Amino acid sequence: MKKLGEIAAFVGGEVVGDAGVVIRGIAGIKEAREGDITFLANTKYFPLLEKTRASAVITSRDVSSPGKNIIRTDNPSLAFSKIAPLICPYKEARPKGIHPAAVLGKDVSLGKNAAIGACAVLEEGVSIGDNSVIYPGCYIGAKVRIGSDTLIYANVSIRENVVIGERVIIHSGAVIGSDGFGFVAVEGKYHKIPQVGTVEIQDEVEIGANVTIDRARFDKTVIGRGTKIDNLVQIAHNVIIGENSIIVAQVGIAGSAAIGKGVTIAGQAGIAGHIKVGDGVTIAGKAGVTKSLPEKGVFSGYPARPHAQARRVNACMQNLPRLYEAVSSLKKKIEKLESMLKGRQDE
């Protein structure tokens, strides 16, 4: 339990209302009850501010709501994420030490306070940094290097020679460093092209469950510092993703694509190979990017085009049934007129 004034001080916010109200829990703005604190970050949910039963709401600096206890902040989402563990502390049960059932190869190097869970396999020459945790059932290939304060959750596979930075989180089922999809067709048969490169995951990256990141054919596939990748994303060989980008679920990025810094790729979008996406670009859900997008902007549709243009195209598509009816009607009228003209000519 915390008083509202204490919470505001913790996140650097300003209380409007009763600073002494006691907060016992956290909840979404629709589900919140008395004793809960919630937040409002999106203006489309503003009508819910008056309806919520929460005892307090974290808002942006410009919001006012008479009769409601609020904490004004610069970033309500960020503030709420900070107070969540303060109000409802959660301590994850992480492995400690080296489990007897773990398998460690020759010349494995473990940093201070590193932990290895049951049935994890670390091959020859693996290096694990200080305070990093390898959960049960993971496979870490030969000569993999993992930095400090990194979490590798259960059943992750990391192939040989991959480099993973500090403060990285990789969720269960991810496969890092699998072979790139490379084959050459000879007389109707496909022959595998060796994939001899690697993968580099830079610091503070988070990789979701069941993500696959292929090793490069040559050189390396790179995930830039601070980038966050949602579940079920496929990143092909030799892809370069810049710093602080967001890749949402079910995105597919084909080989040798170059993604800039601060890019957002929404769910189920597809990026063709060997193209470039510039810094700050936003690609909408289910978009199909077939050509490079070097300039910052919002793009959607298939093939992806500037969002305003895509909306006009979509509006035209919605009118196709009416256009079809209009054209059919005009066709019948023209046929009738032609028939009448022909009849006059025959007279």
Image (cartoon, helix red, strand yellow):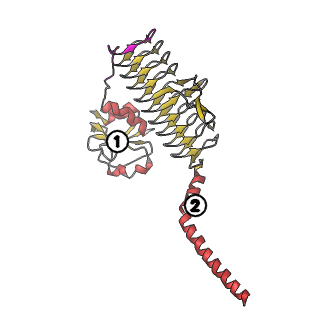
Element type where label 2 sits in the image: helix
Residue at (39, 20) in percent of width and height: 134
Residue at (71, 88) in percent of width and height: 344
Position of 335 relative to 30 (above/below): below
Position of 29 relative to 185 (above/below): below
Tag shown at residue 264: none
Disc 1, disc 2: CB below 8 Å? Answer: no
Q: Amino acid at mark 2?
A: Cys
Position of the C terminus by quadrant: bottom right
**In the figure, is residue 267 to the left or right of 254?**
left
Q: Nearer the viewer, residue 233 or 224?
A: 233
Q: Does the magenta portion include 65?
A: no
Q: Quadrant of residue 328?
A: bottom right
Element type where label 1 sits in the image: strand
Residue 119 rendering spot, x and y as whole percentages: 35, 19
Tag shown at residue 316: 2
Task: Read off the residue under disc 1.
Answer: 38
Range of residues picked out in magenta: 93-109
Q: Quadrant of residue 292?
A: top right
User: Which sits earlier in the primary sequence, circle 1 or circle 2?
Assistant: 1
Farthest-out residue, front: 187
Residue 113 visible in the snapshot: no
SS majority, magenta? loop
